[in-house]
Amino acid sequence: MPDAIAMTSPVSFAAPVALACASVALAAAFAAAWVRRPAVPTMTYLLAGAGAVLLALAAGAPAWSRPGAGEVLVMVDVSPSTRAARYRDGASFRARVQQLLPGVRRRVVAFSGGAAIEDPKQFDGVVWFPEEPADRTVFAPPAGQTVVLFSDAQFEIPQVAPPVYVVVDPQLESPGDAAVRRLEARGDDAVVTVHNGGGPRELTLSGTEEATRAAVPPGPMVVTRKLAASPRAPTVVVPTVVARLNAADAWPENDVLSLRPPPPPVAERWWVGTGGPPPSDPAGGTWRFFRPSELPTDPAAYLAPAVVVLDNVPADDLSPTQSQRLTQYARDLGGGLLILGGDHAFAAGGYAGTAIETLSPLASTPPEPAAHWVLLVDSSGSMNAPAAGGAGGTRWRVAADAAVALLRSLPPDDRASVGGFAAGLSWWTRDRRAAEAGAQPLPPPGAGPGGPTELRRALADVTAAAAAGLPTQLVLLTDANADVPDAAALAEAMQRKNVRLHLLAIGDAGDSSPGQRAMRQLVADTGGTLVEETDPGRWAAAARQLLRRAAPVLLETRPARINFVGGLSALPAREVAPWNRAWLKAGATLLGETASSTPETGGADDDAGGRGNRNGRSRAPLAARWNLGEGNVAAAAFASPLPAEMEALLHAVARPPRDPRLRVTWDPGDPLRVTVDAVEGDRYLNGLDLSLELTQASRADARAAPVRIPQTGPGRYELAIDSPRESALATVRQGRRAVDRAAVAGRYPPEFGAIGNDRAAMRELARRGGGAVIEPSFAGPLDLAGPRRDVPLSAPLAAAGAACVAAALICWKAS
């Protein structure tokens, strides 16, 4: 049965306030007449009362809504989405119309993607409407006529509609359509979403690493495959991914989607080094060359490069601000960083305890303690003098700060002790992991200079406490102006206990005093290092220089054979030299390692940064990568990679950086939706100039005009547009700068996006116009409400009222 239709009053009043006022006046007149009872004929009473009532009703501007006369309009949807409908057969349609509208005058028109079609064709002796192609069905019923609609209701419902009776077609209830709903590129994967509303189908997926043929059972299904590897050069055409279902239903148009993943973005590549830029970019582009001192410190500059290469750059060549920018670039902006080895990199470049060490997937120091570092600061009374050269504070304070900074640059797993000496030793922290000691607030409260300098006693106490087996690296910050009696015996004791003395001489240069000469001899006898610096403002830098000289270089000059593994396994093995000893960090992915250890480069008993194998020998990692925050970082612990190796390493990390303030969300369906959330800290970014640009994947010059992305809320921007018919590259831009981009599949027209009856749309359409949804079981006939026509009643009621009043007066006079 059709849905119930709400009944309304046939008479309405356009001026209800005037009607109320007239009614009050009428009631007052009747009350007065009732109280006074004037001596007039009864007919006068009746005529005057009737006239007053009619005039009061006329004041309310009444209108009578009555059914309009005319024919019923039968509208037939002949768009492609209704291809399997029963009513598309002429004989079935005529039988259904006769059942629903017997004896009713009617006119039949067809519609699809535009204006109504009133010119039927002749097919095998039957007059009927053929299918009309359409990208999207358009339903535009005329006003003033009752409509009987044969359709699946897969269209935009008009805001205002006449009474519409939607006839449900049983063959569109479960049409058995299967469709490829989505095809997306997510990182290195192609993701296909299929929905099968019928019997078993088969999905073919091409353009991926391995061609796929998969059975598709009824219901939804998602298939994920790796995209085919493509060269990094932006001029190379990458293979198109095609997802296709075998043809087995009435709508083959939605059985296929295609996507061309974009080539690598044309973004800047930065080469940072002291030896000059590389001869050429193996990916076919060009490099921007920076010396370490020229590396930008402006955060916005790091939105430009897709990859930054540090070529054999020592840690001290980068300022703290530059190191911070590199960390933000990889961790927060999602950029790619490649660290190359050499004689100024890793341990040889002083990476331990620095930002570069934190970024690298290869550690430059072993995970097990290799030494016990003892850092001693001269805390005698003479160090209480003000520091010269504008360093600020006392000489002791500047020396203590330099020692603490040095502590935080030590290998994190080495043992460390820090203290001061004057008449005796005063430990600030003792025999702890360097990383733990560096996290303490040092020097501790109460520490300070005072007393005589008992230099020999301090050296002897450290030597006596030195543990056997683990070498002790004794770093001394002093002016060395104290006597060191019997220095030869002390040197012999230090040698026996494996204590090496490293002296940062912060007093006057020269060796005029016996203490200075003795200290220099101790440094030489124990195999230590000496750095002299009298300017307190440079003591921290001099301490780092001393540490670089004191720490093991871990640079191998003898060639080692590298085997590439994992993502670089296609590269041939070869010999490399020089190469840096390094250790694979937890969470990193190994990309290359030495073939085996040799007696010259260490065996199973030395910790060469390798991984022990079943034969008791070790392999040293030489290349690795890992994800760091939003970005990728790779490290190669050898110098001068070959072009093919460089290309593979760049491919592992290079990616366009992203502005962390702008988060872009893509919904690559139909329509294509893009949402941008713009937030900086706890502040919304409003009023941004954001736009969406579509570029055909097959032609870089075929670009649609940018479409502005409107702001829809605080910090939120949203846009929905028709998906492109050909695979395209969608780019979100802020002004001219690209913020984000995504590959969008070439999609079939919206007409094929949903097949079958849209029940919700049918009910809403019937509700808006006062019609009904006609189920297949309803045998008719239809009780049509029909369109209604308003007939104004004010004039006739006023005339009738005036006539009654006039007749009442005549009757009164005649009496």
Image: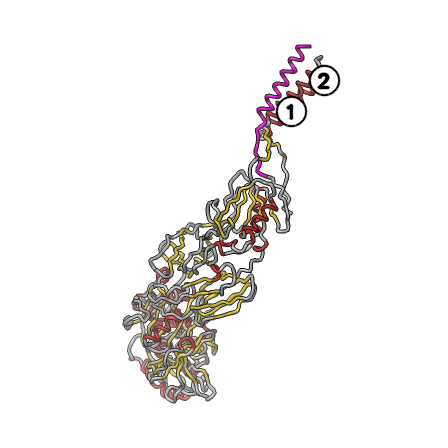
Q: Which residue is mark 2?
A: 35
Q: x and y percent of residue 726 in the render? A: 41, 59
Identify the magenta region. Answer: 786-815
Q: Nearer the viewer, residue 684 or 562?
A: 562
Marks 2 and 1, how far apart in space? 17 Å
Q: Dividing the image into 4 quarters, which one contains the C terminus? A: top right
Instruction: Tell me if 273 is positioned left or right of 586 in this view.
Output: left
**Is residue 40 something one can see in this rendering?**
yes
**Quadrant position of residue 743:** bottom left
Q: How is the image coloured?
A: secondary structure
Q: x and y percent of residue 475 in the render? A: 39, 78
Q: Secondary structure at mark 2?
A: helix
Residue 302, label in figure: none
For the residues bearing labels 2 and 1, Cβ distance under 8 angstroms: no
Q: x and y percent of residue 328 in the render? A: 41, 64
Question: Does the magenta run of residues contain 387?
Answer: no
Q: Which label's residue is closer to the chain start, 2 or 1?
A: 1
Judge the density around disc 1: few (<14), some (14-19), many (≥20) Cα neighbours within 10 Å.
few
Question: Does the magenta run of residues contain 813?
Answer: yes
Judge the density around disc 2: few (<14), some (14-19), many (≥20) Cα neighbours within 10 Å.
few
**Is residue 354 something one can see in this rendering?**
no
Q: Amino acid at mark 1?
A: Val
Q: Nearer the viewer, residue 34 or 433?
A: 34
Count the numbered circles shown. 2
**Quadrant position of residue 174:** bottom right
Q: Secondary structure at mark 1?
A: helix
The correct choice, above or below, for 733 with respect to 3 in the image is: below
The correct choice, above or below, for 498 with respect to 388 in the image is: below
Q: Which residue is mark 1?
A: 24
Give the main secondary structure of the magenta stretch: helix
Q: Amino acid at mark 2?
A: Val
Q: x and y percent of residue 814 in the render? A: 67, 10
